Amino acid sequence: MSLGNAFNKEEHDQTIIDCFLQMWRYSADLMFIMAVEDGDEFSLYDNNPASKAVMGLEKGAEIHRLNLRVQFGDEMAEQVYATYRQVLQGGKPVSIEQAGMRGDGSQIYFDTLFVPIFDSLGKPIFVCGVSRDITKIKEAETVALKANEKLLEYSTALETINQELDRKVQERTKELENAKRIVEESLEAKSSFVARMSHEIRTPINAVIGLSHLTLKTSLNHEQKDYINTILSSGENLLSLVNDVLDFSKIEAGEMGIEKVPFSPKLIVQHAINMNAIKAEEKKLAVTVDISPSLPPMLLGDPLRIQQVLVNLVTNAVKFTERGGVCVRMYADENNDKGVLIRCDVIDTGIGISKVYLDQLFQSFHQADDSVTRKFGGTGLGLTISRQLCSLMNGDIWVHSELGQGSTFSFVLPLNIAPDLLLLNESTLNEKVLKEECRENKSIPNFSQYNILLAEDNLINQKVILGYLDDTLIKVDVVGNGEEAINKLENKKYDLVLMDIQMPIMDGLTASKKIRQSSLYGNIPIIAMTAHVSDEAKKQSAHAGMNAHLDKPIKKFDLYKILQKHLATNKHHNSLQMKGFVMHEQDALHSEVLSNLYSIDTLDIDKAIKNLSGKKDLYLDLISSFYNRYKDFSLAECIGIDLDGVIHSLKSNAAYIGALNISVFCTELEGNIKNGAFCSELIIHLVGMVKVLVDKLKCILMPYFSLIKSSEDIEGFSESDLVNKLKKIVPLLKKSDFFVENHFSLLRKMVRGSKYVLDIENLIYDVKNIEFETAAVKASQLVLELQGD
């Protein structure tokens, strides 16, 4: 039919009816019209071909008010009728998902749009519907649900397996940890046993060697002198054995540290030769040295450990060579701008080693064979320790030898070349070493103007030390324990204390801590004397406030040397012009100050220095600045509108110097104030904590300061220069410009030793934490303070 141009309602409605009739005929969706019958019953008024097919009706069958109860039975009819009643009750179109049965008995799922039809009086007459077959979707959902259930089942099983694996791993880990703990405890027990035995053996060795030296100073006939020299030689051999066992134990326990300092390889070789010169001369052996001229004059490494390896090899070469000679060669195996692989060969014409024994030569407590042990002596530890030391220094050691043809022991070590700023003039160094040796060998110092106190409970050790000191004319008082030492210091002035560590009643560590707390004699140098030679023992001595550490058996010239250093320092420290911590002999005095500061148990100095990237000088400046800032700290300073600022500043400043107890207390106090729980008693307690710390600092710092002065008196410090520098960086801070970090090094130098060190460190800390705005405010406030505004 043709469509008119003008709207015609009859034509328009007819067109829609025609289109819907076509959709009714061809749609795959199920369409139906249910007539509402009397008695709350329904009949199928008509349905489209797709619906007929699902219901099992003939495609062309004419349907008119079909009774579903008759066609499909009451049960099915009642199910669908219930849905129709629900739709009529709702009175508006509604979509419902429902299950049904096809004519062939198979199940089908529908998503049906039901539309109730009412007459003009509101009486229901039809329920029309369009159903979409969603069976495949439902089946897919069912499959997905089943898959999800299966997945959940697998996940549960996997979780069970994982838990079981975790349990087994935890059990195994626990077993391994227990095994590791047992091994570590065994190693610790062995190391502790070796250390204790070392201590117990060193004490009598100290007597043997010391009294032998003293006896040789008396009138002896030739035979007696020979006996004493034999005793002395045996004591030194025994000491060497103890040292080897202790080194071996430390290496096994992983406690052997390797240094990296500048040294002269030529001096190390020369020292190894000098150590064996007398024995080589007795055997009439030719000893030659060949050091390559291309070898850098100064290297970076651990000279003590390299020397230990070389001395052991040269000593063995001399020991096992009866005729001919020993040659030591050192040269660069590889070389570049930054480092060098040094190689050292120790060649002898001695008895040589059979190939049968070469493989076991570097094993613990092994020598070439038992006959060698009997003839030449030794423990067989020397080469083992040498190999372990080379390994610790990332090097290697090996041997080439034939029985009766001599041996060549070689080792290589990768080392760095000392940079120019650390490079020392080798001839000057040699000259200093020679002068030192000459002074030690020929010169006994005159200490007649000094009084010292010796705290030692062992009578033999007392005799040895007094015998050494007798030649120096020094005046010595002797006590047997730490308590007696403190009593002596209370009643008499001394220049130095020689303090044994292990003593009855009060040990040396406890006594030293108590001495450091005294305002009367708290700055006196204390020298530790102990047969405990471990690094841990030395650290304990330093933490107790001791200035230095003498290992037993004590060597006479080591004693003289340490007395010269600390007696001279103690006698003249008042004449040193100390501006902050900028002083002559800075390093030595800094070490003493740090050592004494360790006696303050509320300071975590190690942690503070670590947080400052190991800068000890900066730490001492911060301690000085903290003292200047808080020496007059009082309750009045805390009572004001800026209480938060005072506490916050104290918190960070205390943390800088390691006063963590004060810093933590300030943090808690800030929290209380913020929560409205302010208490004046807490402020009083805080002031008391600061006062106790400041008093302790005063006792330690005052002897090393002529006076702790304000910045106006500090040489080289300029307030105007600091103001100008701060004015330059304030704009950078306001712009959050990281270029400001380029000014930090100069800022630190400008305030060195002044009371502004903490201010600058706080400012730097803010920048590093990207708190530019806070840093800008602090810098501006500091400018105003410096200008007096």
Image (spheres, rainbow, N blue to C red):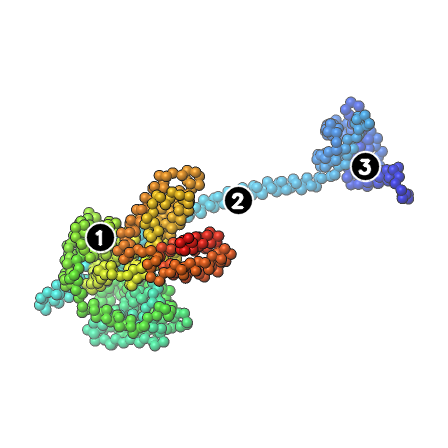
Q: Position of residue 445 (x, y in %)?
A: 18, 65
Q: Which residue is mark 3?
A: 48
Q: Residue 201, can we see it?
A: no
Q: Residue 294, can we see it?
A: yes
Q: Position of residue 631 (x, y in %)?
A: 32, 50
- Disc nearest the viewer among 2 and 3: 3
What's the residue type where badge 3 is placed?
Answer: Asn
What's the residue type where badge 1 is placed?
Answer: Tyr
Task: Give the SS element for disc 1.
Answer: loop
Mark 1 and mark 2: span between their CA atoms? 72 Å
Q: Which residue is mark 2?
A: 158
Which residue occupies the foreground of this view, 744 or 362? 744
Mark 1 and mark 3: span between their CA atoms? 116 Å
Q: Residue at horizontal 28%, vertical 51%? A: 698
Which residue occupies the foreground of this view, 340 or 474? 474
Q: Earlier in the sequence, mark 1 or mark 3?
A: 3
Q: Residue at horizontal 45%, vertical 58%? A: 727
Q: Which residue is mark 1?
A: 521
